[in-house]
Amino acid sequence: MRYISTRGRAPVLSFEEAMLTGLARDGGLYVPDHVPSMTAVQIAALAGLTYEEVAFRVMKPYLSDTFDDATFRQLISKAYSGFGHKARAPLVQLAPNHFLLELFHGPTLAFKDFAMQLIGQMFQASLSRSGKRITIVGATSGDTGSAAIEAFRGLTNVDVFILYPHGRVSEVQRRQMTTPTEANVHALALDGDFDDCQAAVKDMFNDLAFRDSVGLAGVNSINWARVLAQVVYYFTAAVSLGAPYRQVSFTVPTGNFGDIFAGYIAKRMGLPIAQLVVATNQNDILHRTLQTGQQIKEGVTPSISPSMDIQVSSNFERVLFDAYDRDGLVVAKQMAELKERDGFAIGQGAWELLRDHFDSGRASEADTSATITRTLATTGELLCPHSAVGVHVAEHFTGPIPMVTLATAHPAKFPDAVEAATGIRPPLPSRMADLYERPERVTQVPNDLAALQALIRERITT
Ligand SMILES: *Cc1c(COP(=O)(O)O)cnc(C)c1O
């Protein structure tokens, strides 16, 4: 399997190279040159297997011979051993034919652990083989940074630096980043907002001399390996509900289009998915794009589901590439329009293809809160505000086909919104109940590129 860029002008890479590279040199995103399919017999054979074995069978074709089978099985097993639920991604029922896929049993209580834990293991295996070392630098508004730190803490040949906006992440998110004791973990509280953090990271990647001298690598949601790891739970959920003999639909709370794109890949592999529903909060650029065929940037209004407060959805480029029959030059042109003119119109044929695959809906702030309140009353389940956006939207699409809504975070990660809606302050799971007592370690940094680069050079441990 080879990986090509959505803009058609970057080198073709192997899985391992694409994983270590992240963004393509032409500004595009790497995608596999073809999507391998699974037959109904192969899908039926997944029934009753462990999450780890399903993960092995679903992902293996994408890796070619990156790792031998025994090694790959071992990496998967290590990746998910720290989860607080044996099923890894358990399904619970909310209503007749409506199910919730709980993706929050990982070490940082959000679905990003599914991908980040695995790429931590794969990065380390790859680096120890080549003898190289890398420096991961990332910006976060909360969930990505904590998942990255948790995945890379204590690994050899890697330092991980995470920039977050000082004073602007939740206490749970901050403590998840500042309490790990390993020397290769560096939490940096930047004087500025999330955009400043992202700009600083981007500037570091664009400083090629710096990039090469510290071996900079990125693990944000455009990394193909992250998308791939998320394809797995669509299979485990659908097979539990009767696939391949029965169709299943999914509703996905979405910001960067990463998680729902993984569902689209599962469908292309042959999983019988009837509907893929994009659920947005009040920052509804994706819903508007699917409804109107035009993607137009508007400002971001902070919401109670902050991990979906985005202006530009980076993974949308991947599905656009398919909608344009993999014509990278058209995609490059549309992305340039988005950057220069804050919007673009999708061609009629491409828009129709997108609408064949995706439905969409949005939840206002009031809808989100009301859904948290109502779901507790009717099912006993406490939803985080992101999952509530999904449940609200999914309720408009439930019918004879089973609907699965993805629950992307644990309610205890966003206790203020949950308490406001229900009067209940959700406790942390017992395995991390001492989070509030652990000592914190963080460096406050100015919003100054040269100072940041000097700090990173000085702190690198290996
Ligand atoms: C990241 C995140 C999302 C959005 O996921 P995308 O892959 O960006 O669509 C939704 N909910 C939570 C809790 C998240 O952390």
Image: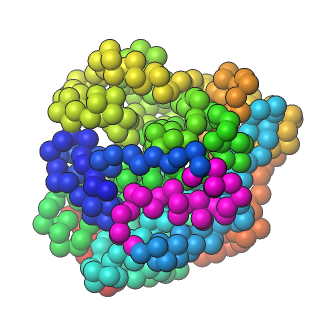
Q: Which residue is drawn at 59% across and 59% down?
A: 54
Residue 365, image x, y percentages:
63, 28
Residue 265, image x, y percentages:
46, 43
Q: Nearer the viewer, residue 285 or 417?
A: 285
* Location of the C terminus (image quadrant): bottom left
Residues drawn in magenta: 42-67
Q: Which residue is drawn at 28% across and 53% down?
A: 3
Q: Which of 451 and 370 is in front in this view?
A: 370
In the displayed orientation, state which residue is furthest to the front: 41
Q: Which of 411 and 450 is in front in this view?
A: 411
Task: Tell me the quarter of the picture where residue 110 sits.
Answer: bottom right
Name the dominant secondary structure of the magenta segment. helix
Residue 152, image x, y percentages:
46, 72
Task: Tell me the quarter of the picture where residue 136 sits.
Answer: bottom left
Task: Tell me the quarter of the picture where residue 216 sits.
Answer: bottom left
Residue 119, image x, y percentages:
44, 65
Judge whether residue 421 can be spotted in this image. no
Q: In the shown orientation, is residue 379 left or right of residue 388? A: right
Judge whether residue 181 can be spotted in this image. yes
Residue 257 higher or lower than 163, as above or below: above
Q: Residue at x 75, y 34 (%)?
A: 98
Q: How is the image coloured?
A: rainbow
Q: How many marks?
A: 0
Residue 111 higher or lower than 74, as above or below: above
Residue 77 higher or lower than 207, as above or below: below
Q: Is residue 184 magenta?
A: no
Q: In the shown orientation, is residue 206 left or right of residue 69? A: left
Q: Which residue is drawn at 36% across and 54% down?
A: 223
* Location of the N terminus (image quadrant): bottom left
